Image (cartoon, rainbow, N blue to C red):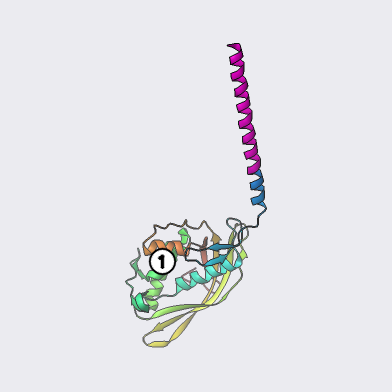
Amino acid sequence: MRAGGNGMIGGFVLTTAAVGGLLLCLTLWNTVQVQRLAHLPPPSLVQLSDGQTVRVEARAHYERSPAVIRRFVADSTQALFTWRYSLPGSGGKESADPGVMLSNRARLPTSVYQAGFCLAEDLRAELLRQLAELSGRLLSGRNGQVVFTATFIGEPQPVKGQDFTWNLTVVGAQVVYAPGRLEGVSLPFNKQITVRAVDPPSVNELVKTPLEQAIQRVRAGGLEIAAIRSLTKPSALE
């Protein structure tokens, strides 16, 4: 019995040593692979679902390049300050836009309401109400349109004391086209736009409604507008 017990103990020790050696080899192999991956250059291209490729570069989570910030501001101001009651349809044809009724009983074009999700939560509701009132006066009901064009978008300037927040100067004009003024009436636009980095929405393939798609689209860049201030004289949008 004593000899058999010693044999079992010896076998157990040998098995344990073999397993330990195997685990050590796996650990060393894993360490080598991690070190190899750590020294590989980051991927520079990402392939999209439609087969297109885009160039990418590694950045900190809330860091945004000046080009990305300026593009976001250009797209956002274009969408927020261009007002028309028409919706794109099939075959390039447009259909009438019923608009969105807000809490102040003023109506806003659907495209502007959707673009409003580029605004910070504490800014969106009041600014959209002001835009609805202004667009209602300038459009004389639902006739005509107001087209915004930016002629200058400045370089982003970091805001002191606020991380990942930038100020940009935007100069342009809103041109009001009405049935009796086909040549248009130009209204100057001279604003300081404050934007800040936020977490972009997670991609959800189950998103179906136009509103959900619009929210994902306007916030995909991980930025939002925190303030809009007039640079010349007081404005209803200040």
Q: Residue 21 location in percent, x, y?
A: 64, 33
Residue appearing at x 61%, y 70% in the figure: 155
Q: Nearer the viewer, residue 67 or 130?
A: 67
Q: Is residue 15 left or right of residue 97?
A: right
Rendered view: 20 above or below 58? above
Q: Which residue is mark 1?
A: 114
Quadrant (top left/top right/bottom left/bottom right) for the N terminus: top right
Q: Nearer the viewer, residue 86 or 228?
A: 86
Task: Judge whether residue 26 is colored magenta.
Answer: yes
Total marks placed: 1
Residue 154 falls in image quadrant: bottom right
Residue appearing at x 33%, y 73% in the figure: 97
Magenta span covers which residues? 1-30
Q: Is residue 238 left or right of residue 11?
A: left
Q: Is residue 160 left or right of residue 191?
A: right
Q: Main secondary structure of the magenta part?
A: helix
Check disc 1: other Cα within 10 Å, few if <14, some if 14-19, many if 20+: many
Residue 156 falls in image quadrant: bottom right
Rendered view: 187 above or below 104? below
Residue appearing at x 60%, y 31% in the figure: 19
Q: Amino acid at mark 1?
A: Gln
Q: Is residue 75 left or right of residue 207?
A: right
Q: Residue 10 location in percent, x, y?
A: 63, 21
Residue 90 falls in image quadrant: bottom left
Task: Judge whether residue 25 is colored magenta.
Answer: yes
Q: Nearer the viewer, residue 58 or 80?
A: 58
Q: Secondary structure at mark 1?
A: helix
Q: Residue 72 location in percent, x, y?
A: 53, 67
